[in-house]
Image: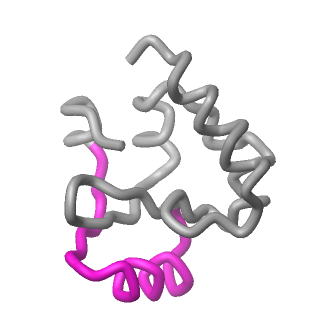
Amino acid sequence: MWVPRMDAFLSKWSVAYEEAKALLEAEGGYLLPYQDHFFVTTAGAIAELGLDPADPDWARIGFDWVRPADAAAWQRLNAKRESAAV
């Protein structure tokens, strides 16, 4: 869930999911995985993935791609990500 164009956006990285989740809860953003790490990033970075950061499904999953609160909403977002030309 990372592309090189996302380097232009400030993201906070963590090796532990729990730490990334705490950052998400404290500061907001979008929690995503990358290999064995996790990061919390901005709406601009989400757009670089070909996704709409204002999509209501983000709120439904709790802005947490790793452990989404709503599996159906995550599946819709994932389908959009797979179809994005990124």
Residue depicted at 73% across the width and 56% down the height = 71
Up-down: is 53 above or below 52? below
Was residue 11 drawn as part of the magenta stretch in this picture? yes
Displayed quadrant of residue 67: bottom right
Residue depicted at 28% across the width and 68% down the height = 12
Q: Residue furthest top?
A: 85
Q: Position of residue 55 (x, y in %)?
A: 74, 40
Coloring scheme used:
one colour
In this picture, residue 40 sits left or right of residue 35:
right
Q: Nearer the viewer, residue 40 or 10?
A: 40
Residue depicted at 76% across the width and 61% down the height = 70
Q: Tell me the quarter of the image containing the C terminus.
A: top left
Displayed quadrant of residue 17: bottom left
Q: How many marks?
A: 0
Up-down: is 66 above or below 14? above
What is the span of residues highlighted in magenta in the rendered image? 9-29
Q: Position of residue 26 (x, y in %)?
A: 51, 86
In this picture, residue 31 sits left or right of residue 8:
right
In this picture, residue 62 sits left or right of residue 3:
right
Q: Tell me the quarter of the image containing the N terminus.
A: top left
Q: Position of residue 77 (x, y in %)?
A: 65, 38
In this picture, residue 44 sits left or right of residue 55:
left
Up-down: is 61 above or below 47? below
Residue depicted at 80% across the width and 47% down the height = 56
Up-down: is 29 above or below 85? below
